[in-house]
Image: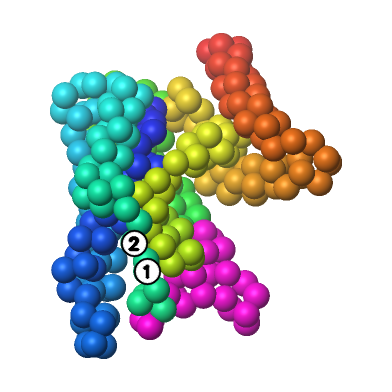
Amino acid sequence: AKEIDLSFGSIMAWGMAAFDVVFLALYRPDNPWSVQAAVWLGFLACLLAGLFAGLLNGFIVVRLGIPSLVATIGTQFLWRGVVMVVTNGQGLGMTPIRDTLLYPLLVGRIAGVIPMQFIWTIIFAVVVWFFLNRHKFGAHVYLTGDNVDSARLMGVNVERIKIVTFAIVGVAAAFAGFVVSAEVLFLWPTLGEGYLLNTLASVFLGGTSVFGGTGTVFGTFVAAFIIAIINPGIVAAGWTAYWTQLIYGLIIVVSVSLQAVLRRKLA
């Protein structure tokens, strides 16, 4: 949609901060029902917090006219600061969630081998692919990213499309934050830090254009696996881990540069 959200890492932590508040308010160790209520309502609060953060990003970008690059850098620091204030910089043990259905549903192992995170990755990819390629919402997203004026002339509510897109990113980020925390059974206030570089590398390597209007879910899906094997590949080759950032940076620069060159040639 010709926008970018750099705050998703902080939204991961912000969603878990909302979980923290609700969980601590409801959790009673001696009451099994309170454990269930605390975990499930905390999970719902996490998703709602992500939705709120996404809507706020969309409002700032669309209604106030601030470029998304600048706006989401600001909200990135905003939500990280909120998390630090709410948690007082302290982590939270999440061991009680093992007694709920939510734990095996999100981070369990199928046949003791296949992690549920992988299943959720496929589910998200299929759902997003469907809406991008088989629903008018996806067509409107592509059209908005390709040419805003043309989209408006064709009756597309560009403002709503962008706000909804930011909201989806917010909910997805909060969900990812919960899954990551559930896997280690601990909430770290620094959750989400360090995800930005490899995420951008996956997106741009997957063919999503920084200029908008171009990109596929399948390309990003494959690129995510390529990016994921770079670090262990570097270690297996005997290089130091410092090479990882260098290679990720090169991937981003080269991908964006190629997009710019191809864009000029096709113009």
Rendered image quadrant of residue 94: bottom left
Relative placement, left or right, of 219 versus 190 is right
Asked whether 173 falls inside the magenta stretch, the response is: no
Residue displayed at 31% across by 47% down: 89
Residue displayed at 56% across by 11% down: 264
Residue 160 seen in this snapshot: no
Q: Nearer the viewer, residue 109 or 241?
A: 241
Residue 150 place in picture, x, y as percent: 32, 24
How many marks can you see? 2
Asked whether 114 falls inside the magenta stretch, the response is: yes
Circle 1 packing at 10 Å, graded few (<14), some (14-19), many (20+), is some
Q: Which residue is mark 1?
A: 94
Residue 118 place in picture, x, y as percent: 56, 63
Q: Nearer the viewer, residue 164 or 52?
A: 52
Q: How is the image coloured?
A: rainbow
Question: Marks 1 and 2, how far apart in space?
Answer: 6 Å
Q: Identify the element where label 2 is drawn.
A: strand
Kind of residue indicated by mark 2: Leu
Which label belongs to residue 73?
none
Q: Which residue is mark 2?
A: 92
Relative placement, left or right, of 9 versus 23 is right
Q: Quadrant of the N terminus?
A: top left
Do the CB atoms of the residues marked 1 and 2 lie less than 8 Å apart? yes
Residue displayed at 74% across by 36% down: 240
The residues colored magenta run 99-122
